[in-house]
């Protein structure tokens, strides 16, 4: 019996401190629609000839 009163006291203190949880967010508010690039290419500054400059490899770093 005493344990039940203690749990109610803790629950009341927790509710007083934190209040209630916020409501659920609808799925429609979590998503956005963005038009695709009509030309079908990636970032405008991408250059396939220089893409090796950004490749990270231990063998290349060590000069092997």
Image: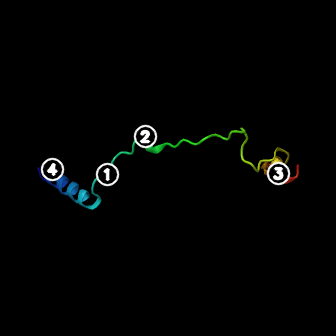
For disc 3, the neighbor class at 10 Å (few under 14, some 14 to 19, many from 20) is few
| Sequence-first disc among 1 and 4 | 4
Does residue 3 appear to the left or right of 62 in the view shown?
Answer: left
Q: Is residue 36 above or below residue 62?
A: above
Mark drawn on residue 27: 2
Residue drawn at 64 percent across, 40 percent down: 36
| Sequence-first disc among 3 and 1 | 1
| Sequence-first disc among 2 and 3 | 2
User: In the rendered image, which residue does mark 4 sit on?
Assistant: 4
Distance (Cα) linking label 4 and label 3: 67 Å
Q: Position of residue 54 (x, y in %)?
A: 78, 51
Q: Secondary structure at mark 1?
A: loop
Q: Position of residue 8 (x, y in %)?
A: 17, 53
52 and 37: which is toward the camera: 37
| Sequence-first disc among 2 and 1 | 1
Distance (Cα) linking label 3 and label 1: 49 Å
| Sequence-first disc among 4 and 3 | 4
Residue drawn at 20 percent across, 57 percent down: 12
């Amino acid at each position: 019996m005493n344990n039940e009163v203690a749990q109610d006291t803790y629950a009341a203190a927790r509710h007083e401190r934190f209040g209630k949880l916020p409501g659920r967010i609808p799925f429609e508010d979590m998503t956005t629609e963005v038009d695709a690039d009509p030309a079908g290419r990636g970032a405008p500054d991408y250059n396939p000839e220089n893409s090796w400059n950004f490749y990270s490899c231990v063998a290349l770093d060590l000069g092997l």
